[in-house]
Amino acid sequence: MNTMLKILVLSLMTLGSVAVHADEWPAITKKARGQTIYFNAWGGSSRVNNYIRWAATEVKQKYGVVVKHVKITDIGDVVNRLLAEKSAHRTSGGSVDLMWINGENFKAMKKNQLLSGPFTEKLPNYRFVDTENKPTVLFDFTTPVDHMEAPWGMAQLVFMVDTARVTWHPSGMKQLLKFAKEHPGRVTYPAPPSFHGTTFIKQALLELATDRTPLYQAVALADFNRVTAPLWEFLDELRPYMWRKGKTFTHGAPEMKQLLNDGEIFISLSFNPNDASNAIANGELPDTVRTYVHESGTIGNTHFVGIPFNSNAKEGAMVFANYLMSPMAQLHKAKPSIWGDPTVLAVDKLNAKDRIMFNKLPLGIATLSPAALGKVLLEPDSSWVDALEKAWLRRYHK
Amino acid sequence: MTLVCFLSAIVIGLISTWTQAFGYMPSIGFNHFSVIHWIRLFSYPGFNSSLIATMISGIGATLLAFIFTFFLFAFSYHNQFWRLLDQALAPLLAVPHAAFAIGFLFLAAPSGWVLRLLSPGLTGFVVPPDWSLMKDAYGISLMLVMVLKEIPFLILMSLGALGRIDVRRSLAVGRSLGYETVQVWIKIILPQLYPKIRLALFAVLAYSLSVVDLALLVGPTAPPTMAVQVFRWFNDPDFEYRLLGAAGATLILLLVVSSIGLLYLLEAGVKLIFRSWLINGQRRSRFFLFSTLSNFLVLALVGVSIGVILVLLVWSFTWRWQFPDFLPATWSTQFWRNGVLQIGGPIWNTISTGITASFLAVILVIGCLENEILMLKRGLKTNTTKILWLIYLPLLIPQIAFLFGVQVTLVILRLDGIWLSLVWSHLLFVLPYVFLSLGPIYRSYDQRITDVAVTLCRSPWQAFLKVKLPMLMRPVLFSAAIGFSVSVAQYLPTLFIGAGRFDTITTEAVNLASGSDRRIVSVYALFQLLTPLMVFLSALFIPRFYFRQRKGMQI
């Protein structure tokens, strides 16, 4: 109830501020022309890299902004570089103009004032964002976004299974245990604190906890041991049946996708519901792979782009962030053959032409329909992340 | 003087890291010195296992690489297998660590090529077995990869050092006294050789204890090695971990220092125990039994490297390739086509930085060595060991222990993200290698030739350019090629000093490795491997072309 109220207030504020700031836009685009921005974003996927290259060409043509994709392996590097710049009192002329972030990194940047301040209300395309039905565009892992980062894409945890190797797939964590016992050595999850690993732990906790309410409060208020006891019991029981007997873990979902293709494991996971279809089209996975979700719903969130406090080309960064939110860019991104990343926009807010285009998007061979994707579970309060990661490390780093 | 400017960066970086390790970092509100981060470090979950895996992989790799290297010299020196090794040495050195590890993984993992070859026919596996061949908890697979990669380097360093020990005559004299070849190697040559390659061995040790990219690819995961752990802490969005990272980085440095001490102790112990054995006059032994093993080792080393290149080639042309098929089901040239289109920028950054850094390094090293000769003529003695230690310093101090500190300093001076800073940071690591590979040969040049040349053409410059340099062209170019391959392989400096703005083949390859698409990763690993290889080949062929009409200069 409380959250809904906050969302309502924030949406109202958004509407108000759009009206106030809309006239600033022409000045911003004018100033942006000729600027070069350094966009720091994970560079591990060639299809994401290709998409960024496409978007960069578009803004170059339309707005005269040059976008340079600084490819990184871990956005934490960049947060750290910004910290180094802050400690050197470099308040302008920073090395980063725009960065791809969410979750803990956003929280850390917000807490340490490494962000340039609210800006999304100045972007014309922000009004198309689905702030009503997609609460995660306003609360990034429960941290209020406060207009300090622009929504870029939606994510929901899904699982992938190779139907050529097995006859059934689990519909929940308890069933996953049964599956692992039936196929010893063929189930694993990435080690926390990697992004996908922590998500898997949170998903398991949400499914197994007898009472979810404490998970949406600060962890300090809850009896951590009592709430998480079913989780550890589950993970302990799973461990001996895991890939490499649970002594070696993977780094993340991309590595698991490769293992799924090899047949080393039978179940993989992803934050992109279109990942399997995309990987099949791309030759990375066999066409017998299918996507599924757990019956109780799966964790969903949003990924964003944010502007650092000392960006050298804030206007150019805003123009690019705005373009990434445009119906055209979002549509192109949602195509399974391009990237398959779900849109942050509310399709019913768009004009008729764009709406039809979105509705005509093909559903990939291994993609679930929106109805089949089921319920989206909200991330637990972000204070749980650190506590869960530490508890996991204490148990399984031996 | 060049040295001072050079090393100041390391000192500044170290001091910055140390103060952070003791909890001092005002920019994030830590104003008081404390040991709390050390306590946190020692009580961190999995600290002990992490330390053990680090020591097994680091110290184990160094000792094994040294033993195997000596083994190869003692048993296979100048036999027909040695010729194979000699020819393979340059390509072996040129293969960057990351590319080698990626290929090795594709070869030796349970779903790798070796098992694909044997399955399902011999093994009956239709899915890969659940064996912990790679990324094992003790870091043994990591150790193995490093051993394979460090042997060629130690061979190169030993070859340089052996130039100053008269091996041929030692062997002849030893044999005429009735000693077996192996006995001569152990009893006469090893005691002379070891002090000369001691520093190189320490560099291997420091590298193996602190390597990040290799450990990410083939190292243990729960917990990872110390270096990976520290790297993660430095990158954690929660800034408090940075202080923990600084403490961990300092611990790695201490680990390197104490391991070097350990090697010294080991050396002293071995001397003490084997002294009487060395001079007992016994001429025969059963050592010759090992000679087949040694020859096999040569074949394995060359074989694995060829396998690595082949498996990368096959994956780079793959579209679909599932276990247990021996070859891909569908082939594709798409990844090469895309790769060639997109590699332009990174290749240019790699080549321009590498050529500049190795060129500068060669000039500086020749300058240093000429200065040495000049001083010698004036009767001044230079303390070569001291200089050697200073030049070696960047190789003995783990990158992770000072690069983060250097980054902060450069940011303050607004010198980060500039190409010249990048070149300078590469030079830090290129220079020692160039010095190491060029120094011994350069010093063994007969200075009297130049003296004669000066009397003939009157100008020392002319004598240097027209006589000495062409005569030394081969080693000069070869050392430049080594410098270039060192520059190509730099990952952390490129990332931190270049502010991520200069993507090189290596940063691209490591980035894409995090995406785990073997086909694209293979294309980039091959690019990463081919670039230094081309430079090595030109270093071999330019002199051959240049000297095509001078019989005395041909090999």
Image (tube, coloured by chain):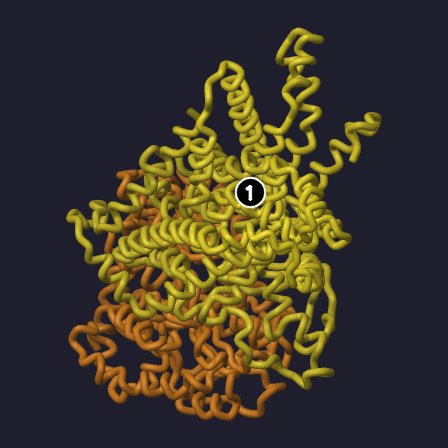
Return the residue at label 1.
B192
Residue at figure coordinates x 55%, y 42% from the top left: B192
Quadrant housing the N terminus of chain B: top left
How many marks the image carries: the answer is 1
Q: Give the colour in which the image draws chain A.
A: orange
**In this picture, residue B419 sits left or right of residue B538:** left
Q: Tell me, yes or no, if residue A50 can be seen here.
A: no
Q: Give the colour in which the image draws chain B.
A: yellow
Q: Is residue A249 above or below residue A312?
A: below
**In this picture, residue B443 sits left or right of residue A92:** right
Give the percent coordinates (x, y) of residue A356: 53, 69
Q: Tell me, yes or no, if residue B468 can be seen here.
A: yes
Compare residues A373 and A87 and report the one nearer the observer. Answer: A87
Give the percent coordinates (x, y) of residue B120: 70, 82
- Kind of residue sitting beneath label 1: Gln
Give the percent coordinates (x, y) of residue A203: 36, 79
